[in-house]
């Protein structure tokens, strides 16, 4: 018992570590949900701190919260925002519905810190009460979705969007660097008409630029907050000015354009901002899989594949084959994107669990959206720095495959017709002779005409 103190809640007494700043309700959640050992990430804890800080400010401003208590709560919440107390947020990510345990974890930790600042001891709810003071005018049902929206917006603008912008710039640089490289195009993994290597990279860049626009658009849905809706959206027990004041304070603290939603009941029922962001994350992952898969194909070899691109070597590729180097960064990106797509499936399924006034599955939605942002941001940084920037072209191989591409025959269609062109193509494949040799031999073109028409540069 020397290492424990007795904490109380409405169900009775609970033993809590003397070092813990949380109380009985958090401890019960720890004991009830020993599921994964995974916690909601620090950016979510930061968002909870922002909510509690802003709520205390609003309640003081509205004359509902004693100023001495309110200032202590704000000071405690600011330390949570700064990450000082992350180790006190101990509830498993897979927890009680709606995130009640998560909300109470924040309420109890902040109450204990505030109590100490006022000269008391941690867990002394007579000085600062987690429900009556820290949670004043709030409910799990409006603070958890608000925290999801805030943390997602912060993670997007501090992590993912900058990483995506850097990748787009690197692709644009490669697009320009490779502009003069004419190579064989491929459709259905078969020979197709020529294309600039730079044009392929322009396609990659364009896909990600579209996603960047989509993330900025999705952010608009995150900015509309329903804090102040309380339990079901009616704002019970909250001052009439509380919601507007608290949300304006969130805007000030984060520097992001949060505002009070016009649809508080919708906000309570459906965390659609998180669903929207998850959908864009999934679509981005799909395009990144396409890009990484293309680069793996184009760099395959080096002796038995296409070998048109040369990837930076970052580590040995085999424990048994000396000298082998694998496209590990691209494989890493594929795995990350597979997880993001799976996370979206979880978010969609959880979102479909909304019933009546709230969605009880919010914690797992927040976990998956934030994990997707984190791993995709980190993956993009690694992909850009360790693969894309150092990517080079093997001009010998692009020329080699271009000269052998049977689809150059497409340029003959307007001059000798589709059927004769098909005959030339089949003979080229069968004999290994060039299209030019065959069409001249058959007398269908002069040397000068064949040189002009079958010049790949004229087909772009």
Image (spheres, rainbow, N blue to C red):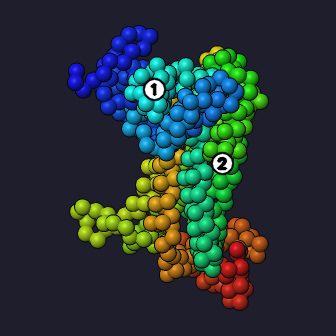
Residue at the spot x=52%, y=20% of the render?
A: 131
Q: Residue 424 location, x and y as percent?
A: 63, 73
Q: Is residue 201 above or below residue 21?
A: below
**Crowdedness near tag 2: few (<14), some (14–19) or many (≥20) residues, C-alpha within 10 Å:** few
Residue at the spot x=65%, y=66% of the render?
A: 202
Which callout, 2 or 1, points at the residue further toward the start of the chain? 1
Q: Which residue is mark 2?
A: 255
Q: Residue 58 location, x and y as percent?
A: 66, 31
Farthest-out residue, bottom: 448
Looking at the image, can residue 274 be seen? no
Q: Is residue 307 left or right of residue 176?
A: left
Q: Residue 445 location, x and y as percent?
A: 71, 84
Q: Which residue is mark 1?
A: 108
Q: Between residues 353 and 341, which one lies in front from this camera angle?
A: 353
Residue at the spot x=23%, y=63% of the render?
A: 320
Q: Secondary structure at mark 2?
A: loop
């Amino acid at each position: 018992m020397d290492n424990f103190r007795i904490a109380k809640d409405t169900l009775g007494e609970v033993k809590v570590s003397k070092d813990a700043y949380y109380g009985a309700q958090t401890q019960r959640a720890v004991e009830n949900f020993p599921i994964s050992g995974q916690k909601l990430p620090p950016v979510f804890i930061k968002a909870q701190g922002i909510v509690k800080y802003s709520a205390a400010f609003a309640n003081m401003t509205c004359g509902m919260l004693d100023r001495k208590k309110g200032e202590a709560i704000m000071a405690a919440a600011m330390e949570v925002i700064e990450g000082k107390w992350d180790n006190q947020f101990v509830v498993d990510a897979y927890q009680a519905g709606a995130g009640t345990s998560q909300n109470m974890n924040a309420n109890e930790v902040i109450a204990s810190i505030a109590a100490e600042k006022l000269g008391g001891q941690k867990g002394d709810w007579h000085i600062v009460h987690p429900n009556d003071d820290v949670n004043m005018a709030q409910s799990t049902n409006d603070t958890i979705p608000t925290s999801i929206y805030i943390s997602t917006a912060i993670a997007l603008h501090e992590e993912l969007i900058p990483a995506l912008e850097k990748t787009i710039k690197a692709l644009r640089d490669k697009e320009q660097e490779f502009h003069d490289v004419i190579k064989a195009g491929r459709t259905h993994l078969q020979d197709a008409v020529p294309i600039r290597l730079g044009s392929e990279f322009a396609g990659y860049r364009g896909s990600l630029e579209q996603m960047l626009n989509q993330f900025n658009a999705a952010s608009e849905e995150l900015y509309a907050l329903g804090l102040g809706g309380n339990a079901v959206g009616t704002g019970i027990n909250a001052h009439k000015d509380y919601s507007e004041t608290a949300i304006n304070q969130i805007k000030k603290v984060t520097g992001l354009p949060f505002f009070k939603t016009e649809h508080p009941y919708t906000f309570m029922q459906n965390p659609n901002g998180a669903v929207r962001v998850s959908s864009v994350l999934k679509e981005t992952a799909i395009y990144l899989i396409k890009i990484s898969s293309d680069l793996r194909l184009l760099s395959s070899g080096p002796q038995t594949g296409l070998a048109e691109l040369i990837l930076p070597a970052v580590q040995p590729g085999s424990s048994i084959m000396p000298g082998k180097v694998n496209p590990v960064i691209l494989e890493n990106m594929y795995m990350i994107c597979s997880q993001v797509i799976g996370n979206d499936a979880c978010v969609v399924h959880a979102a479909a669990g909304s019933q009546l006034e709230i969605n009880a599955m919010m914690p797992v939605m927040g976990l998956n959206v934030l994990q997707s942002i984190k791993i995709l941001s980190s993956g993009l940084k690694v992909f850009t720095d360790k693969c894309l920037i150092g990517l080079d072209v093997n001009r010998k191989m692009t020329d080699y495959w271009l000269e052998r591409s049977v689809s150059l025959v497409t340029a003959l269609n307007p001059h000798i017709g589709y059927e004769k062109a098909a005959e030339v193509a089949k003979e080229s494949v069968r004999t290994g002779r060039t299209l030019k040799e065959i069409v001249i031999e058959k007398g269908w073109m002069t040397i000068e005409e064949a040189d002009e028409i079958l010049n790949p540069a004229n087909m772009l």
